[in-house]
Amino acid sequence: MDILHLTYFIEVARQKSFTKASQLLHVSQPSISKVIKTLENELGVTLFERLGREIELTDVGHAVFKRAQSVVSEFHDLSNEIHDVVNIKHGEITIGLPPMVGSRFFPSIIGKFKKAYPQVMLKLIEVGSKQVELDVKNGLLDIGVIALPLTESDIESFTFVKEELKAVLRRDHPLANFEKLSLDKLRDEDFILYSNDFSLNGLIHKECQKNNFSPTIVCQSSQWDFIAETVDAGLGIALLPETICKELDPERLLSIPLYNALIPWNLAIIWKKNKYQSFATREWLKLCKKNFKTHYTEL
């Protein structure tokens, strides 16, 4: 048993699939299957139940999974600390970014960081906020970016964007003449919402329930552009942050503020409390704080 084997086991457990794990790890499926079989033989237990194409952790598997995450996290902390001692300006940072966030806010920061530390590798992982937060807590990511609120414990953060969602409609929509809209007026509309691993979905559903309705969902996506194009095609309405609304074509789409509904889009950078931070990670956080305090004066 070694750290690499435990890493493979953790990814298979997370993905509930040998195929998906092999794709993410860039390792052949037979190799991963062999590693899992070796682990099971060494421990004398069955770690996974095979249910057709899907797999589930056994009770023992859940116990091993929890401990394995801790072991791998501690090993990475040790590796980072040794790396800092040996060569202070080398290293790697693994950053979790929701697909809708990375391209809007981080290209310039990445450019500045790479200019200052060209030998530090930035490994960007695109997943939804919920998974980012969980992976930061479990030590699989050094840094994460999420849409608040936080749901996990032992996490530190700083907020760098505070915005509200607006209703996005076609210019020929019957509600297009309103200067403001209550959420209640949208109860009969078809909604284009976000993918299920986006925390914004939960906030939208919560506010709709306060107005005594559940949104009728016709489409879900993790891409701003696709959502906007779907609205333009007449398939429904969307609720998008102010930053994204500014990029919409005003000849085709309108963004209208909401009232009597609190649906914030607050973005935060997060890291695990009391986890060792490498020199590179500390410098990344310092650059982000400096950059975002310059551009977001409401902080």
Image (cartoon, rainbow, N blue to C red):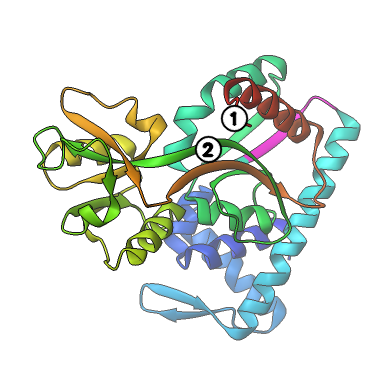
Choose between 260 and 111: the one closer to the eye.
260
Which residue shows up at 49% across the image and 77% down it? Answer: 56
The picture places residue 138, in percent across and down from the top left corner, at 67, 59
Position of residue 282 in the picture relative to residue 192 (left or right): right
Vertical placement of residue 126 versus 255, above or below: below
Amino acid type of the residue tagged 2 in the rendering = Lys
Choose between 166 and 157: the one closer to the eye.
166
Location of residue 67 (image quadrant): bottom right
Kindly tell me whether residue 27 is visible in this rendering. Answer: no
Q: Which disc is residue 248 wearing?
A: none
* Label pair 1/2, CB-CB below 8 angstroms: yes
Mark 2: few, some, or many residues within 10 Å (few <14, many ≥20)? some
Amino acid type of the residue tagged 1 in the rendering = Glu
- Residues shaded magenta: 88-94
Kindly tell me whether residue 41 is visible in this rendering. Answer: yes
Which residue shows up at 82% across the image and 52% down it? Answer: 274
CA gap between label 1 and label 2 equals: 8 Å
The quadrant in which the C terminus is found is: top right
Position of residue 145 in the picture relative to residue 44 (left or right): left
Q: Which residue is mark 2?
A: 162
Q: Which residue is mark 1?
A: 298
The picture places residue 149, in percent across and down from the top left corner, at 56, 54
SS label for mark 2: strand
Choose between 14 and 136: the one closer to the eye.
136
Vertical placement of residue 169 versus 199, above or below: above
Report if residue 60 lies within the magenta region: no
SS label for mark 1: loop
Location of residue 179 (image quadrant): top left
